Image (cartoon, helix red, strand yellow):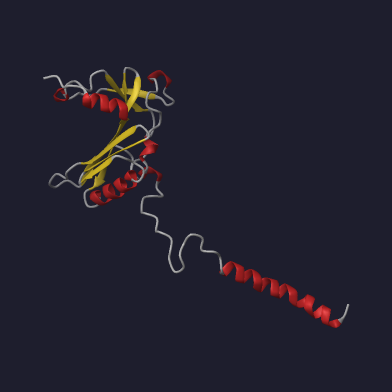
């Protein structure tokens, strides 16, 4: 092998390294236009507790006796002003810690059954009064991403997705209170429509 050939071989590894560095530093931009940056991830988006799907521990229509988790019955006082719409429903709390909601442990988490079939889930948490509106707005924006039709009216946020109707409400802060309740209800959309369409008894 000639002296010139040996010099080329000795220089080859260095040239290869330079080539690799050039490739890494000039990665393709894909669909992004030059000079732009990826959209920032919304605060709370990475927290699974901001996704209401985590509250649905069993599909609507699940028979009480086939519940995948242990439950115990909770006695509720039904509001007669609703025309008996809650009659026939039995609500249960789960044995153990319930799923978290907006980064907090729920004060209330109930699975309600109508004629022994799951048709509603109620969850509520208490938020610090100072940042309750901000937390609610962030959660509502995430929930509305994949839901339609939907509504957002100040302290109410509602939507539908895959046959599930959800409705969230941020209560007004009473004077002097340090916390405010956020309540979220998931229900079978078809059954909810049927109840809403039924004539109310006078």
Residue at 14% over, 44% down: 174
Report the label total.
0
- Residue 82, how many percent across, how many down? 17, 25
Foreground pick, 97 / 200: 200
- Residue 87, how many percent across, how many down? 23, 19
- Residue 162, how many percent across, how many down? 38, 34
Give the position of the C terminus as an image quadrant: top left
Residue found at the far right of this picture? 1
Say if 57 sits above or below 115 in the image. Answer: below
Res 95 quadrant in image:
top left
- Residue 133, how many percent across, how many down? 23, 49
Say if 132 sits above or below 193 in the image. Answer: below
Res 118 quadrant in image:
top left
Residue at 31% over, 30% down: 189
Residue at 37% over, 42% down: 51
**Left or right: 85 in relation to 189:** left
Foreground pick, 90 / 165: 165
**Left or right: 23 in relation to 175:** right
Task: Determine if residue 37 is in view.
Answer: yes
Task: Determine if residue 111 is in view.
Answer: no
Give the position of the N terminus as an image quadrant: bottom right
Res 144 quadrant in image:
top left
Foreground pick, 106 / 116: 116
């Amino acid at each position: 092998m000639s002296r010139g050939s040996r010099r080329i071989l000795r220089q080859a590894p260095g040239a290869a390294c330079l080539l690799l560095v050039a490739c890494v530093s000039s990665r393709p931009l894909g669909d992004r236009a030059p000079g732009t940056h990826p959209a920032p991830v919304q605060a709370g988006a990475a927290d699974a507790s901001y996704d209401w799907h985590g509250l649905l521990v069993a599909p609507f229509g699940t028979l009480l006796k086939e519940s995948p988790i242990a439950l115990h019955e909770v006695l509720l006082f039904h509001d007669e002003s609703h025309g008996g719409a809650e009659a026939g429903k039995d609500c249960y709390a789960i044995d153990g810690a319930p799923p978290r909601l907006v980064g907090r442990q729920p004060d209330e988490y109930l699975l309600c059954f109508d004629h022994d079939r799951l048709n509603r889930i109620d969850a509520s948490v208490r938020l610090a009064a100072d940042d309750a509106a901000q937390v609610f707005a962030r959660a509502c924006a995430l929930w509305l991403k994949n839901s339609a039709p939907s509504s957002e009216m100040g302290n109410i946020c509602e939507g539908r997705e895959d046959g599930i109707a959800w409705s969230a409400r941020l209560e007004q802060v009473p004077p002097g209170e340090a916390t405010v309740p956020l309540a979220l209800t998931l229900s079978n959309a078809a059954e909810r429509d049927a109840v809403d369409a039924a004539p109310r008894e006078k």
